[in-house]
């Protein structure tokens, strides 16, 4: 049986329009920062909680705009579909503001010149990457 998980994630860029990506421990895939929605939790509240837990980043709800939802295969869990609810940080994040915590193994800024060298999770590749490459902001 195919399981389904719901997550809230964010497209976060710096002043150079590089894209913030993370890689969890024991994973080969780079993905947008964010995480699983807990029962009764609003999407934006999940995002704010996960960004604080995983990266030590603190934001206000109105720092983000909702871009949409996308459903695809989960990168790290077999027989699982992920429903990603994607937000956009509406202001650039300073380059020196990162502190990986919790289950995050690696945090990096992906550029438009090196994105092909990353193994991307499906949600990032299918939903966020085309928008970022098209300079939607």
Image: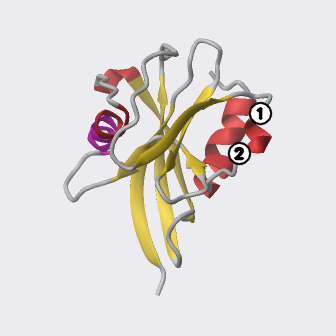
Residue 123 picture location, percent across and down: 59, 53
Judging depth in this view, the residue of 125 and 127 nearest the camera is 125
SS of the residue at dot 2? loop
Q: Is residue 44 magenta?
A: yes
**Magenta segment, which residues?**
43-50
Q: Is residue 104 magenta?
A: no
User: Gap in Å between the C-alphas at discs 1 and 2?
Assistant: 8 Å
Q: Relative to residue 126, is residue 10 depicted above or below?
A: above
Q: Quadrant of residue 52?
A: top left
SS of the residue at dot 1? loop
The disc label shown at residue 69, or none: none
Residue drawn at 26 percent across, 45 percent down? 42
| Residue contact at pointers 1 and 2, CB within 8 angstroms | yes
Judging depth in this view, the residue of 120 and 68 nearest the camera is 120
Residue 34 picture location, percent across and down: 41, 44
Residue matched to label 1? 114
Looking at the image, residue 73 sits to the left or right of residue 134; the answer is left
Q: Residues within 10 Å of mark 2 (few under 14, many from 20)?
A: few
Judging depth in this view, the residue of 68 and 25 nearest the camera is 25
Spot the residue most to the left: 40
Q: Relative to residue 73, is residue 32 depicted above or below?
A: above
The disc label shown at residue 118, or none: 2
């Amino acid at each position: 049986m195919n399981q389904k998980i719901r997550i809230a994630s964010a497209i976060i860029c710096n002043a150079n329009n590089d894209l913030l990506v993370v890689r969890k421990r024991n994973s080969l895939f780079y993905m947008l920062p964010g995480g699983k929605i807990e029962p009764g939790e609003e999407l934006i509240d999940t995002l704010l909680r996960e960004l604080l837990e995983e990266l030590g980043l603190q934001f206000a709800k109105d720092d983000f705009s909702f871009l949409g939802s996308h459903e695809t295969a989960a990168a790290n869990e077999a027989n699982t579909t992920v429903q990603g609810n994607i937000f956009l940080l509406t202001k650039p994040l300073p380059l020196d503001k990162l502190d990986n915590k919790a289950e995050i193994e690696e945090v990096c800024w992906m550029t438009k010149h090196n994105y092909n060298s990353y193994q991307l999770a499906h949600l990032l590749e299918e939903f966020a990457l085309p928008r970022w490459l098209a300079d939607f902001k």
